């Protein structure tokens, strides 16, 4: 996967063209879904889609003038540093507020992208267009803000600063939650394998602590090295890495602590209860922050966690 800083000017414009097309499709999809029940909001999204199409036309004209007619298809998902979003069609039905939040996040991310791209550019004409697009995405001059007064009632307007808060939740808090989920599930197998293999609570505790801390170090390094935060605005990689690593370790330590109890049956019973609570908490987190229907999240997490638990128990009992 290529880093944003390694992209050529030609590749940056090609990436911007495909991104504008993706965003226009997302807005058109939102408009289509809201047409019958929220025609005012649907009109907002239709005009936002048209604005993205206009941005794409400006970028395409500039690209063809500078580099010729062939435009390579470069997606954001192929570039290190962009926040990974599920396509709208993959996350089921979004309610109207979720659609507006998604649009606000898109605008803020695009603003950061264009500002970074403009600073990266060595061509004054390219930099001028990228800065123009950055300002269009910023909010003050974007259709999302202008059409709010034109089509939407006051009770559905988003307070200034709310977008940044949501983006912070998405880009900073969510990696920590992912770490918590990873630690809670990935450490089940080694913990219960040690428990049923040895029947010794202290040995099991040591194995659980080692698995939790090891998973935390691995997850922390992976998150910290994933991007430098300049393009996504996710903050310093050291802070993100520490958050993800600590939360991963905490996820594993939760069901390890019962093995400080000397009685094996009591410790194991309590650990199983804690695992059950953790899995339901993870299901709620996926529902709340990752646009996953609760029953689907509960089924996936319960089945996955149960299989990992059985794997550890089976290996330990062999």
Image (cartoon, rainbow, N blue to C red):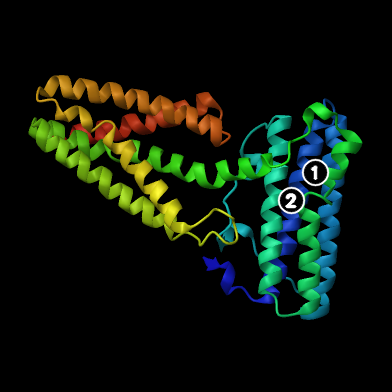
Q: CA–CA distance between discs 1 and 2?
A: 9 Å
**Frontmost residue, 36 versus 147:** 147
Q: According to the image, label 1 marks what residue?
A: 28
SS class, disc 2: helix
Percent x, y for residue 80?
Answer: 54, 62
Q: Residues within 10 Å of mark 2 (few under 14, many from 20)?
A: some
Q: Is residue 37 left or right of residue 89?
A: right
Q: Is residue 218 left or right of residue 60?
A: left
Percent x, y for residue 113?
Answer: 67, 61
- Asked if 85 appears above or below 36 in the picture, the reply is below
Q: Is residue 225 left or right of residue 144?
A: left
- Asked if 117 appears above or below 46 in the picture, the reply is below
Q: Residue at x 85, y 53 (%)?
A: 51
Q: Residue at x 69, y 49 (%)?
A: 106
Q: Residue at x 42, y 57 (%)?
A: 238
Percent x, y for residue 284?
Answer: 48, 27
Q: Is residue 146 left or right of residue 96?
A: right
Count of numbered badges drawn on the protein: 2
Q: Quadrant of residue 121?
A: bottom right
Q: Residue at x 68, y 34 (%)?
A: 98
**Frontmost residue, 72 versus 39:** 39
Q: According to the image, label 2 marks what residue?
A: 23
Percent x, y for residue 45?
Answer: 82, 41
């Amino acid at each position: 996967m290529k880093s944003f800083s390694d992209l050529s000017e030609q590749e940056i414009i090609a990436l911007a063209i495909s991104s504008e097309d993706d965003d226009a499709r997302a807005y058109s999809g939102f408009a289509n879904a809201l047409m019958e029940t929220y025609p005012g909001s649907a009109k907002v999204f239709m005009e936002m889609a048209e604005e993205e199409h206009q941005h794409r036309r400006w970028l395409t004209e500039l690209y063809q003038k500078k580099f010729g007619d062939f435009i390579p298809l470069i997606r954001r998902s192929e570039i290190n540093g962009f926040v990974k979003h599920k396509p709208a069609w993959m996350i089921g039905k979004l309610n109207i507020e979720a659609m507006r939040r998604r649009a606000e996040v898109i605008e803020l991310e695009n603003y950061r992208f264009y500002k970074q791209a403009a600073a990266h550019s060595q061509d004054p004409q390219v930099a001028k267009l990228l800065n123009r697009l950055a300002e269009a995405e910023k909010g003050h001059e974007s259709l999302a803000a202008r059409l709010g007064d034109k089509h939407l009632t006051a009770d559905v307007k988003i307070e200034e600063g709310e977008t940044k808060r949501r983006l912070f939740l998405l880009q900073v808090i969510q990696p920590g939650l992912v770490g918590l989920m990873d630690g809670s599930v990935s450490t089940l197998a080694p913990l219960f394998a040690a428990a049923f293999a040895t029947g010794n609570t202290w040995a099991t505790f040591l194995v659980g602590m080692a698995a939790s801390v090891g998973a935390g170090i691995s997850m922390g390094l992976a998150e910290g090295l994933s991007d430098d935060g300049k393009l996504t605005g996710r903050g310093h990689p050291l802070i993100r890495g520490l958050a993800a690593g600590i939360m991963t370790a905490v996820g594993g330590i939760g069901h390890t602590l019962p093995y400080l109890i000397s009685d094996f049956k009591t410790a194991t019973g309590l650990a199983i209860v804690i695992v059950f609570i953790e899995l339901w908490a993870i299901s709620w987190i996926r529902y709340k922050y990752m646009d996953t229907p609760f029953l689907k999240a509960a089924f996936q997490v319960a089945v996955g966690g149960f299989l990992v638990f059985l794997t550890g128990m089976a290996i330990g009992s062999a």
